[in-house]
Image (spheres, helix red, strand yellow):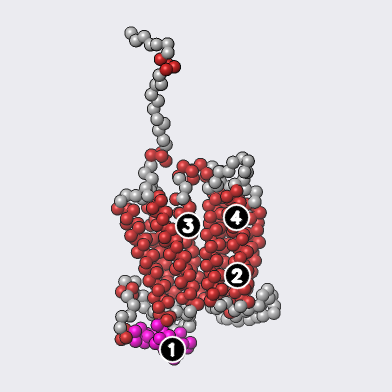
Amino acid sequence: MSEKRSIFEDVGEKSAVAAPVGGVIDQAPKGARRGIRIWLGILFAMVVLMIAVGGLTRLTDSGLSITEWKPVTGALPPMSAEVWEEEFEKYRQIPEYQLQNKGMSLAEFKVIYWWEWGHRQLGRAIGLVWALGFLGFAVTRNIPTGWARRMWIVGILGGLQGAIGWWMVSSGLTGERLDVASYRLATHLGLAFVILGFLAWYSLLLARPEKDLMQARRGKETKLFSLSTGLLHASFVQILLGALVAGIDAGRTFTDWPLMAGGFFPPDAFALTPWWTNFFENPGLVQFIHRMWGYLLVAFAIVVWRRARGSAHSATRFAFNAVMAALTVQILLGIVTVLYVAPWQLAILHQVMAVLLWVLILRARFLSFYPISTSIREA
């Protein structure tokens, strides 16, 4: 028989209510999301520095000063006068010295040697930071669910980049050319931007809680995301074309704009044989393609930007506004660089601006996929 209860019991006393149980996302181990984001941010900054140093290494014609690939022992620079002489003698055997720098002094050789050594040393430092960070998070079991594979992707691409770097350098040591092959330079730079893209995208993912991302994904702007993906690919092609221009110093060959040597189409655009080599090694044709693709890229960016203006999310609209602003600056920088015969200061600024534009496009694309919720009044 049940006990008698006071008529005031339900009013005066609160029954215990079980706390709500979270879903699978709430129960999954979070890991050190903030720590991994900081680690990725450090790697991101180092890769940006690596791209800048690589550009300066190319602009100072320093890339072929070290004629061997020694991933481990090469970390130590020459420590005596005898070793310096040995390194200099190796450099004297390659076409760049014999046909371009003959008579260079040891002091002048040391300048270009230090540029290349610093470039390679920075690559080693990036690999070390990745390895220590990954091992640290793995040993302490602080890797969030599903993130080990992503972290491995960054490391594998970094190792591949080192191998491609030597593949690029070796093309200038065979006696067939004075400098490295332009298409290998484009491959090397292109992979650097791919690595940068992964680091930026992963950092953006880690900047917001998983529940927020899952909810934001429901508001994905499919058409805008598709257009921004196309813009990302188009800008990547322009980056590769810019590397081809840089690889053969095409930016210093035709220095008028908007015409080229007084005409729309450059003279002797198909002078090389076989004909297909002109698309990689003919300065006039390579620069012409770079210019034309730039015009198409601007036109496409305007289409994407106009579509983004209709977004209901202010953060997304602002992100695409930033893309258009950066693209405008980049186009102006490209024109000025050509008109002033590509001095190293403008050339490296043009390259660094490409990094900024690439990241801004990635961020705008991210926000079209994971929009930040906006109030009805603001929309």
Q: Residues within 10 Å of mark 2 (few under 14, many from 20)?
A: some
Answer yes or no: is residue 93 visible.
no
Q: Which residue is mark 2?
A: 333
Label whose residue precedes the other's in the sequence (4 or 1): 1
Task: Name the residue located 46 percent from the left edge and 72 percent from the top edge.
Answer: 54
Q: Are marks 3 and 2 in contact (CB under 8 Å)?
A: no
Q: Nearer the viewer, residue 96 or 53?
A: 53
Q: Which residue is mark 3?
A: 200
Q: Secondary structure at mark 1?
A: loop
Q: Rounded to the nearest whole Å, what is the CA distance between mark 4 and mark 2?
A: 20 Å
Q: Secondary structure at mark 4?
A: helix
Judge whether residue 96 is colored magenta.
yes
Q: Position of residue 40 (x, y in %)?
A: 42, 57
Judge whether residue 251 is colored magenta.
no
Q: Nearer the viewer, residue 266 or 298?
A: 298
Residue 74, relative to residue 205: is it above or below? below
Q: Which residue is mark 4?
A: 320
Our reading of the magenta stretch's main secondary structure is: helix
In front: label 3 or label 2: 2
Q: Secondary structure at mark 3?
A: helix
Residue 104 is tagged as 1
* Residue range (magenta): 84-110
Q: Residues within 10 Å of mark 1 (few under 14, many from 20)?
A: few
Q: Residue furthest right?
A: 263
Q: Rounded to the nearest whole Å, what is the CA distance between mark 1 and mark 3?
A: 42 Å
Q: Nearer the viewer, residue 55 or 180?
A: 55
Q: Nearer the viewer, residue 253 or 32?
A: 32
Q: Position of residue 2 (x, y in %)?
A: 34, 10
